[in-house]
Amino acid sequence: MAVAITTIPLPYRPGFALIKQMPQSDFDSIATALEKAQISGGLKGLASTVLQQVPTLKRDEVESILRTVFSLSALVTDEESPLSENISSLTTAMQTANIPDLALSNQQRAEFEKRLARLLQIKNLTLASKVRRLETDFPKTFHDALVVTDMRPVFDRPEERPVGAAITHTLEITYHEDGEHKDFYVVLDAEDIETLKKVLQRAEAKASSLKAFLKSANLPDLS
């Protein structure tokens, strides 16, 4: 039974629009680059490979295309129904979505479906998509971080000069949840920073140990 695709999620619309609108020569170059690419390095590694072959594109455009294909691959390639039926379900949703950038004439629909089918049959791309799903299959995933350091004066009497100051740090973590960017804030002192440094150093050490194990087992690190 084909996957029932009824809407096009907002984060993936730019990627579909780029796949639809780009010149055939650019699309062929992208597909060829992906067919020859190594899957190690994840999305950014694949994007770098594509940019070497198609310098007319911008990095954010290539990454948008890859995120879209990764998401679609997770949806349509693990099902028992034929790939063509699942792609047809997607293009039907695009035709009825009333979104100008995604609008498809019948002729455009046939060409767009060919492009998606070619991308979704690139083994390296589907494997990279699986790696990404394993890495991000959590309710919340990290996006960015920032530490704001403050000096807060301490007064004995409000009308007199400060008797000293306390230094505080506010850690802001930006993460993904339900397709949105969200923020979390926590105040740290000097001991907290040392604790975080030790935790991260331990994580690096464990990662190095696991990489050595993969190498000894002749298995590639696909992170």
Image (cartoon, helix red, strand yellow):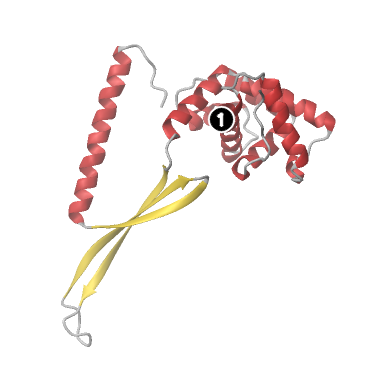
Position of 111 with respect to 198 (left or right) is right
Mark 1 Cα within 10 Å, few/some/many (few <14, many 20+)? many
Residue at 75% from the left image edge and 34% from the top image edge: 92
> Residue 83, image x and y in percent?
66, 21
- The residue closer to the viewer here, 40 or 115, is 115
Residue farthest bottom in this picture: 159
Position of 182 with respect to 94 (left or right) is left
> Residue 138, image x and y in percent?
42, 37
Q: Can you see residue 22?
A: no
> Residue 144, image x and y in percent?
41, 47
- The residue closer to the viewer here, 24 or 42, is 42
Task: Report how many numbered discs are placed on residues in the image.
Answer: 1
User: In the image, is residue 158 above or below residue 115?
Assistant: below
Position of 162 with respect to 9 (left or right) is left
- The amino acid on which the numbered mark 1 sits, given as a three-letter code, is Phe
Residue at 42% from the left image edge and 31% from the top image edge: 135
Position of 177 with respect to 121 (left or right) is left
User: In the image, is residue 39 above or below residue 8?
Assistant: above
> Residue 32, image x and y in percent?
63, 20
Hey, which quadrant is residue 186 in on the image? bottom left
Helix, strand or loop at label 1? It is helix
Residue at 62% from the left image edge and 18% from the top image edge: 121
Hey, which quadrant is residue 198 in on the image? top left
Q: Which quadrant: the C terminus? A: top left
Q: Can you see residue 184?
A: yes
- The residue closer to the viewer here, 115 or 165, is 115
Q: Which quadrant: the N terminus? A: top right
Q: According to the image, label 1 marks what residue?
A: 70
